Image: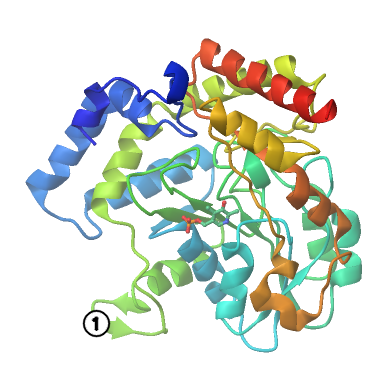
Amino acid sequence: MLFQVALPAPLLRDNIVAMEFVDLQAQYRRLQPAIDARIRRVLDHGRFILGPEVQELEAALAARLGVRHAIACASGTDALLLALMAFNIGPGDEVLTTPFTFFATGEMTTLLGARPVFADIDPVTYNLDPARLEAAITRRTRAILPVSLYGQPADMDAINQIAARHALPVIEDAAQSFGALFHGRPSGNLSTIGCTSFFPSKPLGCYGDGGACFADDDSLAQAMLELRNHGQAGRYLHTRIGINGRLDTLQAAILLAKLDFFDEELAARDRIAARYTALLHEAVHTPGVVPGHTSSWAQYTIEVDEREAVEQTLREAGIPTAVHYPMPLHLQPVYAKFGLGIGSFPHAERAAARVLSLPMHPYLEPEQIDRVADAVRAAVGATASQ
Ligand SMILES: *Cc1c(COP(=O)(O)O)cnc(C)c1O
């Protein structure tokens, strides 16, 4: 990885320069002195598990979000698991969530023996439609788990109000939305517990797996802190059944280095998204950010009619794309037992068939954005005239 940085970008057929979907090496080239210094410090002190950088990161994250407690953990998936475990969710319980998300959102509920119950999304934001929640709440519902997809917060005020009426906690899956604001308040601190991911390609990413939980409530935070480390209340004193869900000290150090540049990166993502939208809104369906929300632009996701053809044309032009996500959770084979067939959640199904994410990271150059936009316009023009 280190010496690849110095190599010229690979050439495809016809001298087309390949482009990264998320260019982590461009970021490393910019932030290298800060990241290297932070890594070196950990190698020097040698406290690789729960070393000082983990607490330093937790304090920095809590301060940034204005939340009392941040608990760093091993992944976004573990963050969701720890949050659900903190509420003792288990067999017989239901957790209300969106079918249009990364699989982990539903998976952790099922892993605990509980059942994810789905409600359809708002087709503009792709997030849970609060208007559909009430009808899905039963006497078994134990929590509402909205996702802030692609970086835009879900409609948390409306969701929190419904939850309060039913005395339910809300866990925000903020894996993609770290850095986003909802009416000025940071995603991750919009509900009872917020969960995020530091997977390398997320808006704030480390160089491996990582995640965090956020909570104001002292006893929930204490529960997650203990659950993260084998349910230990003290050294070798186990008061709960937990997991090994700790964040490595090295990953905490990398995140601390990147955190100093994160606001600049968010601003760059916003500029890039605006340029994409200006160039593309007449040709395709571009993302809609609700007034009062900001997006951390984990993804810049358009909708197209003939997705496979567009993907193929872009691939030939050296432009990588991705589909987040091609199959909603209720149609996944493992959830076939729920008997929720096609037509159960039409907005989620329609989105799954049409969405296409374009290259997005803070170091995209204006010429690269223009090249992507030109290629997209040409590709949809070509499919429309077929
Ligand atoms: C990435 C992601 C997760 C899982 O995070 P990991 O760190 O990969 O475990 C969960 N939910 C959503 C919406 C995600 O995008």
Position of residue 18 relative to residue 60, above or below, is: above
Q: Quadrant of residue 27?
A: top left
Q: Which quarter of the rendering shows the C terminus?
A: top right
Q: Quadrant of residue 5?
A: top left
Question: In terms of secondary structure, where does tag 1 sit?
Answer: loop
**Residue name at image x 68 percent, y 31 percent:** 294
Residue at 72% across, 60% down: 328
- Asked whether residue 182 appears in the rendered view, the answer is no
Q: What residue is at 68 percent from the left and 69 percent from the top?
A: 332
**Quadrant in which the N terminus is drawn:** top left
Q: Name the residue at 60% across, 21% down.
A: 372
How many marks do you count on the picture? 1
Question: Colour scheme used in the picture?
Answer: rainbow
Amino acid at the residue labelled 1:
Tyr
Q: Nearer the viewer, residue 226 or 359?
A: 359
Q: Residue furthest left?
A: 44
Residue at the top extreme of this rendering: 367
Disc 1 CB within 8 Å of nearest ligand 1 atom: no
Circle 1: is it few (<14), some (14-19), or many (20+) Cα within 10 Å?
A: few
Residue 282 image position (x, y, % from top left): 82, 19
Residue 83 lies left or right of residue 211; in this view the side is right
> Front-most of 284 and 191?
284
Depth order, front residue of 92/223 = 92
Residue 338 versus residue 166 in the image, above or below: below
In percent of width and height, residue 302 lies at 72, 34
| Percent of width and height locating residue 8 | 29, 19
| Percent x, y of residue 40 | 13, 38
Would you say residue 338 is visible in this rendering?
yes
Task: Find disc 1 in the rendering and name its residue.
Answer: 236
